[in-house]
Image (cartoon, rainbow, N blue to C red):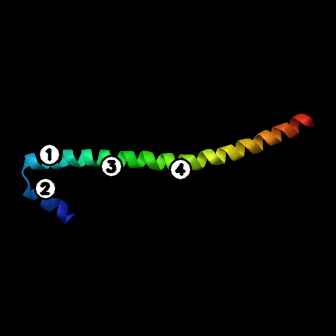
Amino acid sequence: MAIIHGIFLDLDLSQIKRLSFEGFLLTFIVVFPSLLLLEWIFDLENHEEFKIVEKRISKLEKRRRYR
C-alpha cells in the first residue's frame, strides 16, 4: 500500500492519468484474453462430460422404448 501511495504522491496529475489509462489498457489486453482462454479450456472438459451424459441418457431412453 505504501508503494501505491508513493507513486501517486510523487507524480503530478497528468502522469497519474497516463499511468491509470495505460494500466487499464494493459489489464484489458492481458487479462481479458487470458480469461477467454481459461473459459475455453474448462469448457472443453464440460463438453466431454455432456457427451458422456447424453450417451447415457440416450441408452436409457432406448431401453425405455423397448419395454
Q: Secondary structure at mark 3?
A: helix
Q: CA distance from mark 3 to mark 2?
A: 23 Å
Residue 44 picture location, percent across and down: 56, 47
Residue at the image point whose x is 13% and y is 49% from the top:
16
Tell me which numbered mark, 1 or 3, is placed earlier along the sequence: 1
> Mark 1 and mark 2: span between their CA atoms?
10 Å
How far separated are the C-alphas under marks 4 and 3?
19 Å
Local SS, label 2: helix
Instruction: State the CA–CA distance, disc 1 to disc 3.
Output: 20 Å
Residue type pointed to by label 4: Phe
Which of label 3 and label 2 is nearer to you?
3
Query: To which residue does mark 3 refer?
Result: 30
Q: Is residue 48 left or right of residue 42?
A: right
Q: Which residue is mark 2?
A: 8
Q: Residue 17 got which mark?
A: 1
- Report the quarter where the N terminus lies: bottom left
The amino acid pointed to by label 3 is Val
Q: Nearer the viewer, mark 1 or mark 4?
A: 4
Disc assigned to residue 42: 4
Disc 2 or disc 4, which is closer to the eye?
A: 4
